[in-house]
Image: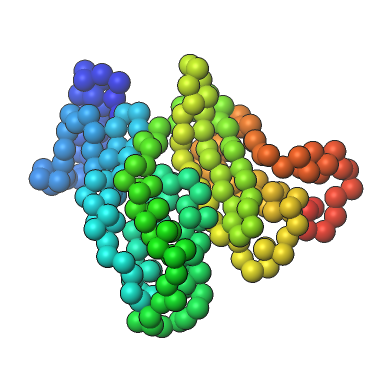
């Protein structure tokens, strides 16, 4: 994204020169120039933010109540694509995700419950009111806020500067059956490892501050002889 229109023209010239030297051509009907925002892979992208494509959000809002496992898979596929906009997505979606564990046949009827209804409605509401994600500023440090709960992990990647807090992305996932047996310290440590890997493309070359509400991690920080799963 060019900071000014004049710079944009210069950038386009360099792109065209590179294409010409490589003997490559473009289809004009697929090209869009000099736009303040553009639609790409079901996202609306501007110079300073990323937001969901309203057309795909509309398809989520109009999605009928699932009747089969395949319906649940389709709904989770739609909402899961925008999970970075929904804080604690895995926690909210857990009742629906649980349905997928009950049966292996896509047309099998569901064990629908009030929890499923609440999750279904909440995901729709969260997506229609989803916050706009800011593009990262690599000149500023990142803040990774992590949390572990009974059956999942969650993380928020943010930045704080100019007296403002900028949300870059949300992330979450459910725990496996084995991971659910972990103790509190192990789950919190797992969250940090998972979150840093998940957001690696952002934080690999930047300063990062990790925030957690688990005081037990202070014990891990001050322990020299860590063994077993915590060491791994």
The percent coordinates of residue 166 (x first, y second) are 46, 29
The residue positioned 21% from the left and 18% from the top of the image is 6
The percent coordinates of residue 17 (x first, y second) are 22, 32
Look at the image and tell me whether residue 4 can be seen.
yes
Compared to residue 133, the image places residue 25 above or below, namely below
Apparent side of residue 157 relative to residue 228 in the rendered image (left or right): left
Apparent side of residue 36 relative to residue 222 in the rendered image (left or right): left
The residue positioned 31% from the left and 66% from the top of the image is 65
Compared to residue 175, the image places residue 34 above or below, namely above
The percent coordinates of residue 24 (x first, y second) are 20, 45
The residue positioned 31% from the left and 29% from the top of the image is 47
Q: Residue furthest front?
A: 114
Residue 204 occupies which quadrant of the picture?
A: top right
Apparent side of residue 220 relative to residue 157 in the rendered image (left or right): right
Q: Residue furthest left?
A: 29
The percent coordinates of residue 154 (x first, y second) are 56, 48
Query: In the picture, which quadrant includes the C terminus?
Result: bottom right
Of residues 143 and 101, which is closer to you in this image?
A: 101
The residue positioned 30% from the left and 37% from the top of the image is 45
């Amino acid at each position: 994204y060019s900071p000014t229109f004049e710079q944009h023209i210069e950038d386009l010239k360099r792109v065209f020169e590179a294409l010409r030297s490589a003997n490559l051509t473009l289809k004009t009907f697929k090209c869009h120039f000099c736009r303040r925002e553009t639609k790409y892979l079901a996202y609306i992208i501007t110079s300073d933010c990323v937001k969901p494509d309203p057309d795909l959000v509309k398809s989520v809002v109009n999605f009928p109540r699932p009747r089969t496992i395949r319906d649940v898979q389709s709904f989770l596929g739609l909402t899961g694509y925008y999970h970075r906009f929904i804080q604690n997505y895995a926690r909210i979606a857990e009742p629906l995700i649980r349905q997928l564990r009950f049966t292996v046949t896509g047309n099998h009827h569901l064990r629908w419950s009030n929890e499923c209804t609440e999750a279904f409605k909440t995901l729709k509401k969260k997506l229609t009111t989803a916050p706009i994600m800011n593009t990262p500023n690599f000149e500023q440090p990142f803040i990774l806020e992590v949390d572990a709960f009974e059956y999942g992990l969650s993380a928020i990647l943010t930045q704080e500067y100019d007296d403002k807090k900028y949300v870059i992305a949300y992330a979450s996932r459910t725990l496996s059956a084995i991971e659910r047996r972990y103790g509190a310290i192990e789950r919190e440590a797992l969250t940090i490892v998972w979150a840093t890997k998940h957001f690696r493309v952002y934080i690999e070359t930047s300063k990062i501050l990790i925030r957690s509400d688990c005081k037990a991690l202070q014990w891990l920080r001050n322990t020299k002889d860590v063994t077993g799963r915590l060491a791994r």
